[in-house]
Image (cartoon, rainbow, N blue to C red):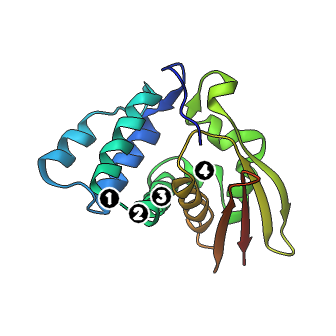
Amino acid sequence: MSVPPNDSLMISGIFLAGFAQSCVNLNIVAGQRATRLLANYEFGAWYPYGQFRELQVNFFEAYSNGAPILERVGIEMMRAWYHFGPGKDIVKTGVDFLHFQTGSQGYASVVKGPVHEVGSFVLEDVNSERGYARILSTTPFDRDMERGVLIGGMSAPGDLDFVDVVYDPTTHRYLVEYH
């Protein structure tokens, strides 16, 4: 995971609001701080990546081992995307969510900017009979949160009984198993 050098990388307001709302739902932030956090983002607007980094910095200041919590944030973001956002219109099954990642289609719906900063999130292989998929990620985002995004996006439609996602940092790939 690399950090873009400037603010030419833009993040969708729905992505930032989803992250913020997930932090509130999971009681990571509460009270007036939560109210201020949620008031900052409009769904249809685009924001510099730096604003997302600020959210993450605040998060990591509060938690020394944030990996499991960031995974839950990713899951919550995708549940909200599916149940309260456009998700139900885009994907009908967990495997549909995988296919939505083809050519970074899903990723490109919430991130824009120069290719060298945006990176990619690409479905490289899927075998529905074996319940296996492989995804390449060169994004600047936290891998634990991305793992949660995959688990949450595949689980949200409710048709799968099992989703497991493992990240291999040497190949920058997620290995997904599902049934």
Work out whether mark 1 precedes mark 3 in sequence or the reverse, and give the earlier one. 1
Secondary structure at numbered mark 1: loop
Work out whether mark 2 precedes mark 4 in sequence or the reverse, and give the earlier one. 2
Tell me which residue sits at (33%, 54%) in the image: 23
For the residues bearing labels 1 and 3, Cβ distance under 8 angstroms: no
Q: How many marks?
A: 4
For the residues bearing labels 1 and 2, Cβ distance under 8 angstroms: yes
Instruction: Name the kind of residue labelled 1 in the image.
Output: Tyr
Instruction: Name the kind of residue labelled 3 in the image.
Output: His
Residue that mark 2 sits on = 69
Residue that mark 4 sits on = 89
Alpha carbon distance from label 1 to label 2: 9 Å
Q: Residues within 10 Å of mark 2 (few under 14, many from 20)?
A: some
Mark 4 vs mark 1, foreground winner is 1
Q: Which mark is residue 83?
A: 3
Mark 1 vs mark 3, foreground winner is 1
Seen from the viewer's position, the closer of residues 153 and 83 is: 153
Residue 135 at least partly seen: yes
Seen from the viewer's position, the closer of residues 152 and 134 is: 134
